[in-house]
Amino acid sequence: MSTQNTASSSLPTQRLLAKVALITGGATGIGESIVRLFHKHGAKVCIVDLQDDLGDKLCKSLAVDSACFIHGDVTVEDDISKAVDFTVKRFGTLDILINNAGLSGAPVSGHP
């Protein structure tokens, strides 16, 4: 009896075709992985991040007509409004928003 999992090989590769996703913190780490995976599955992606160089570089590594980057700080409400407006203006809609941005501080055990 085989225990090989074949579920991943049967997944459709374009399951996000025609969807538009905005991903905060999308220039590096988990956010970058989300951007790449969504793009691979057919989504148009808008990367929002503080790291302009990395965001631009990632955007340019993807198809120009299906990826964009905008500088944004998730702690500034106006930046998020601008990112949403930018995405909708660029792609005509917004279907998915991934709030991935964040900074790590001291571990919880380090607080009194």
Image (spheres, rainbow, N blue to C red):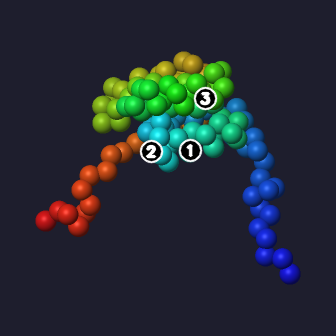
Q: How far apart are marks 1 and 3 (CA)?
A: 14 Å
Q: Residue 5: x, y in percent?
A: 77, 68
Amino acid type shown at disc 3: Ser
Could you tell whether 102 is left or right of 85 in the image? left
- Residue 3 visible? The answer is yes
Quadrant of the image occupied by residue 43:
top right
Which of disc 1 and disc 2 is earlier in sequence? 1
The residue where tag 2 is placed is 100
The quarter of the picture where residue 34 lies is top right
The reply to whether dot 1 and dot 3 touch (C-beta < 8 Å) is no
Q: List the single residue furthest toward the top.
A: 89
**Residue at (58% x, 24% y) in the render:** 60
Percent coordinates x, y for residue 40 in the rendering: 69, 39
The residue carrying pointer 3 sits among few (fewer than 14), some (14 to 19) or many (20 or more) residues within 10 Å by Cα, namely few
> In the image, which is nearer the foreground, mark 3 or mark 2?
3
**Residue 109 left/right relative to 7:** left
Query: Which mark is first along the chain, 3 or 1?
Result: 1
Residue 36 image position (x, y, % from top left): 61, 40
Q: Tell me the kind of residue under disc 2.
A: Asn
- For label 1, the crowd category at 10 Å Cα-Cα, with few meaning under 14, some 14 to 19 and many 20 or more, is many
Q: Residue 61 carries which label?
A: 3
Asked if marks 2 and 1 touch (Cβ < 8 Å), the reply is yes
Q: Relative to the observer, which residue lies in front, 53 or 65? A: 53
37 is higher (above) or lower (below) than 18: below
Residue drawn 86% across the image and 81% down it: 1
Q: Measure the alpha-carbon separation of dots 3 and 2.
A: 20 Å
Between discs 3 and 2, the one toward the N terminus: 3
What residue is pinned by disc 1?
Answer: 34
Residue 46 in sight: no
- Left/right of residue 6 with respect to residue 93 in the rendered view: right
* SS at badge 3: helix
